[in-house]
Amino acid sequence: MRIAVLAGGIGGARFLRGVRAACPGDDITGIVNTGDDVTLHGLRICPDLDSVMYTLAGAHDAERGWGRQDESWRIMDEFKQYGAEPSWFALGDLDIATHLVRTRMLDAGYSLSDVTAALCQRWQPGIPLVPMSDERCETHVIVDLEGQRRAVHFQEWWVRYRAGLTAHGFVQVGVDDAKASAGALAALSSAEVVLVAPSNPVVSIGTILGVPGIREALAAGRAPVVGLSPIIGNAPVRGMADACLPVLGVEVSAEGVGRHYGARSSGGILDGWLVHDTDTATVPGVRVRAVPLLMTDDDATAAMVRTALELADARA
Ligand code: FO1
């Protein structure tokens, strides 16, 4: 079966491990958010693509969820000695090698899709990974800082300020000149099922959906679309979706996010919606199922993937 998965970083990586475990012989493509991408110290950094690539390869630091295991920070220490800002974004020595290779290839004119495929040659994630777009489309956050309303890069808001500055909005800088990557469009048009990972509905899934061509491909595709709620109870399992959803006026609940995504039959994206077994949700036009949604290990995630695929069948 051909499965396309919309995914963010840490949660998306865990989810993709479960899809790979549940569907070993199937043709899966991960369409990954690149709105978190940032250029720092002259390096092009793609946090979500790297989190997914490292995690699927088993090379990630499980505790942090991002970056490499057995990492060292000698270059960061040197940056600090030189007063080379920003020092608030921690780049590990091993991780820097990835950014150097990526930056060199991008500077040589390769697309982000080509670069990602080249990096995956080494890591063999077992699932083809494609960026949502080959053009830059960086998430910035509208905040009040030093008495001024301004946009700061998502990474500065999330890492430097720990999402502690009230977000008044999210903008995708560059989205007007961006388009869905060829790999993403190919995966969506040939998919028999599309899964929406339990990633941040605003700055991960929302960012992917904001790329011109993605929503149109979902709407035009024959494939049923089934999403999994990133909210259990009234809180995200991880991350800061609860700092993002209210900005869009969306209730921090499985029902709130399901309704935010909306039914494909009425201009939204969903045919099915999985919520945690302690939650209930009514989403008009969408079939809802309550199952355990904690991705405690690959088997637990694989179980929810199988339920999502059953739900997709029911809609086919
Ligand atoms: N997250 C942090 O909280 N602190 C960091 O210093 C940090 C550095 C970092 C470096 C490379 C990378 O790929 C990810 C990194 N992240 C860090 C995580 C990153 O902010 C998040 O993974 C996503 O962008 C949001 O999900």
Image: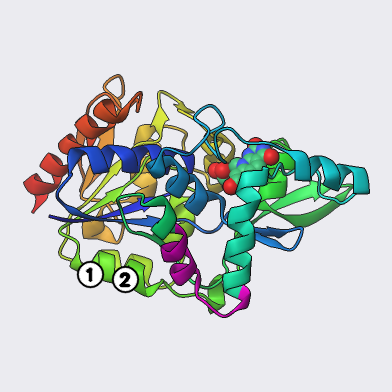
Residue carrying label 2: 185
Q: Quadrant of the N terminus?
A: bottom left
Residue span colored magenta: 107-119
Q: Left or right of 243: which side holds 295?
A: left
In the displayed image of the protein, which residue is found farthest to the right? 82
Q: Quadrant of the C terminus?
A: bottom left
Query: Mark 2: few, some, or many residues within 10 Å (few <14, many ≥20)?
Result: many
- One can see residue 132 in this view: no
Viewer-closest of 115 and 222: 115
Query: Mark 1: few, some, or many residues within 10 Å (few <14, many ≥20)?
Result: some
The residue sitting at 29% across, 44% down in the picture is 227
Q: Position of residue 294 (x, y in %)?
A: 34, 25
The residue sitting at 14% across, 49% down in the picture is 25
Q: In the rendered view, tell whether residue 209 sits above or below residue 258.
A: below
Colour basis: rainbow
Ligand 1 visible in quadrant: top right
Residue 189, label in figure: 1
Look at label 1 and name its amino acid.
Ser
Q: Left or right of 254: which side holds 284?
A: left
Viewer-closest of 185 and 28: 28
The residue sitting at 84% across, 44% down in the picture is 78
Do residues under tags 2 and 1 come within 8 Å of each other at their CB atoms?
A: yes
Q: Position of residue 244 (x, y in %)?
A: 56, 42
The residue sitting at 78% across, 57% down in the picture is 150
Look at label 2 and name its amino acid.
Leu
> Regarding mark 1 in the picture, which secondary structure is present there?
helix
